[in-house]
Image (cartoon, rainbow, N blue to C red):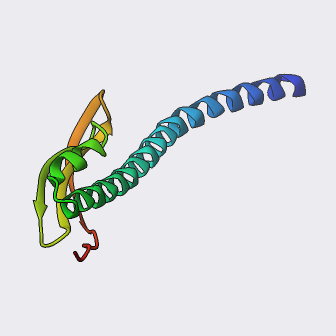
Amino acid sequence: MGLRTALTRLRRGQKGQAAVSMAAFVPILVMFLVLLVQGIAAVSAVSELRDAARDGARALEENKAPRPAVMASLPDWIDVTSVTTCGRGCVNVRASIPLGIPSIVEVIRVPISAKATFPTREA
């Protein structure tokens, strides 16, 4: 067996090893990306809910019903479970968000809530 034959066998073994390493790495990369997207979606949902609660509190301060204002400012993938008043110009909103791939695979729904107070005007 010559040096050339030994080097050829070594290169073939390395190509196979690279394929096995890549096959192990790709699922880990995909899981990381899915978790990253889920984290971004959760942070976005909490921010959206906080803004919606503020819109509801503003509507309440203007002597309007807070629920339509809350519903109008939220995306469809956030399900509102309750909109309650908690005093003058104060609104508490509870909702749930899906974990998984929205509109494709929904694994579980996670409850979130936000409370906002809009300063009342003195007449």
| Residue 50 vs residue 95, the one in the foreground | 50
Image spot of residue 110 (x, y percent): 21, 51
**Left or right: where 110 falls relative to 74:** left
- Which residue appears farthest toward the bottom when viewing the image? 122
Residue at x 48% of width, y 38% of height = 30
Q: Quadrant of the C terminus?
A: bottom left
- Which residue appears farthest toward the front when viewing the image? 123
**Left or right: where 8 falls relative to 37:** right
Residue at x 22% of width, y 60% of height = 62
The correct choice, above or below, for 69 with respect to 20 in the image is below
Image spot of residue 35 (x, y percent): 41, 47
**Left or right: where 44 falls relative to 107:** right
Q: In which quarter of the image is the N terminus?
A: top right
- Counting every numbered tag in the picture gives 0
| Residue 47 vs residue 10, the one in the foreground | 47
Residue at x 28% of width, y 38% of height = 77
Quarter-of-image position of residue 4: top right
Residue at x 23% of width, y 56% of height = 59
Quarter-of-image position of residue 31: top left
Residue 26 visible in rendering: yes
Image spot of residue 33 (x, y percent): 48, 42
Residue 113 visible in rendering: no
Image spot of residue 50 (x, y percent): 31, 59
**Left or right: where 20 falls relative to 108:** right
| Residue 26 vs residue 12, the one in the foreground | 26
